[in-house]
Image (cartoon, grey):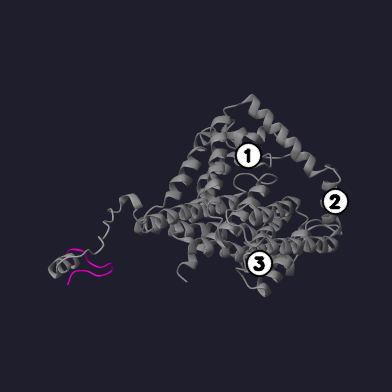
Amino acid sequence: MARWLPALLTAAFVLSGSFKEVGALASLPVDVTLLLAVAVAGLVVWEVIVGRIPPAVHLVVLGFLLLLPAAFFTAPTPYGEDKAVRLFTLTLLSMLAPALLIRDRADVRRHLIALAVVAGVVVGGGLFNPRLSSNYTGAPITTESVDTIGLGTAAAVVVVIMTMALIWKAWPLLLALPIGAASVYVLLQSGSRGPLFSAIIAIVVGTFLVRRRPSVRRGLVFLGLVAVGVLVSFSLAPEYSRGRILNFFEGNNAGSVDNRVRLIEVALDQVTRHPFGIGLGGFEGAAFGGYFYPHDLPVEVLAEAGVILGGAFLCWIGYCMVRAHRATVDFTGGATFAVLVCVLGKSLVSGDLNDNRLTFYVLGIALAAGLLYSRSAVDSADQTPEAAPSELSKPPRVPIPAPTAGTPSDYARQSWETPIIGQGRM
């Protein structure tokens, strides 16, 4: 149980914004996110004091150092200052914690299951206590503490993990199937298009684009079940949730989609005008309609950190993904990589760096898993017994002369000097 506590606390800290306004948590005298952050930071400090620092920690620190110069040119606005502070505290902690706390592949599995449990709590809120996102009939659902995109993201994470568990036979069918079905239902109820499409892509990637593929037939069966679940849940979704999804397929980009396309265009224009970046939070000055960021993580990084450092940061994320892919040889590694694909896909269409704290958390888990796999592979190679000597390294075999006529003493001397095969001297 002692090894489960860090995983549960870290997952709860990362997703705390999705449940901290629910019930008695909303009346606490201290912010739940800060409370959990202090607990996780304490665990991190303790591990630094009593344990060794894994290689994943160095890579995490290196990645965030690439954004440090942009912090020196933070926009002098409340959003800019808050963004810089949160980036190098809460967001950094969300990735640093798993990189430091994960010691073996069992810890990777614990963090993955803890994420599924906490995200499942959020999904349960949307299932048993839904709230309308707006004051009109047929509006997408939310909860007391999370908006449609947050609820959809939590549901997408659970759907991916449950589907991978079914494909890999890692969890009992009677447990994973109902949880996955309920999560698909909540995902469609929220009307969140980004998490929905990201989850579908992630399941395909986790099934077929891994180093060791599970049963193809089993993968196709459960992919078909997911498709059926999506169609059934779509027919039961609120009117405007269905409309948002249908508008996307029909090419009707009016509303949020059109605005986000324009935001990306503005951000790319800023990249052209200011190739060295405009500082953290600087996009707010170029945005329109009260937006603060372009709702696209790569474009946001390039615009605010510059082409050189921002591009290096994106290459760092790509490198972490390559290392994470090395662990895709079982359920733990494959599901972790699939969840990473899911949350990265969501970060392309919603939120800023700090809103995508979940992305950095999963990236930290996946990076630790990839490095642990590489280390275990090297250890296995070191423990492999030496190969048998080649024929060239063996001493030449001396033929045994055939017996010839002679005196009894000659025969005795010959049998003493030429031992029989498989028998030594007496």
The residue where tag 1 is placed is 298
Residue numbers of the magenta segment: 416-426
The alpha-carbon separation of the residues under discs 3 and 2 comes to 29 Å
Numbered disc 3: secondary structure: helix
Q: Amino acid at mark 1?
A: Pro
**In the figure, residue 412 lies in which quadrant?**
bottom left
Q: Nearer the viewer, residue 100 or 41?
A: 100
Q: Earlier in the sequence, mark 1 or mark 3?
A: 3
Q: Nearer the viewer, residue 376 or 131?
A: 376
**Other residues around mark 2 within 10 Å, as few (<14) / some (14–19) / many (≥20):** few
Task: Tell me the tag on residue 246.
Answer: 2
**In the figure, residue 279 lies in which quadrant?**
top right
x, y (%) of residue 282? 62, 34
Q: Amino acid at mark 2?
A: Leu
Q: Give the tally of numbered discs.
A: 3
Q: Amino acid at mark 3?
A: Leu
The alpha-carbon separation of the residues under discs 1 and 3 comes to 33 Å
The alpha-carbon separation of the residues under discs 2 and 1 comes to 27 Å
**Other residues around mark 3 within 10 Å, as few (<14) / some (14–19) / many (≥20):** many
Above or below residue 83? Residue 12 is below
Tell me the mark number nearer the camera, choosing from 1 and 3: 3
The residue that appears at 68% across and 33% down in the rendered structure is 267
Does the magenta stretch mainly form a helix, a strand or a loop?
A: loop
Q: Earlier in the sequence, mark 2 or mark 1?
A: 2
Above or below residue 364? Residue 68 is above
**Name of the residue lying farthest toward the front:** 405
x, y (%) of residue 189? 78, 60
72 on left or right of 282? left
Task: Tell me the tag on residue 166.
Answer: 3
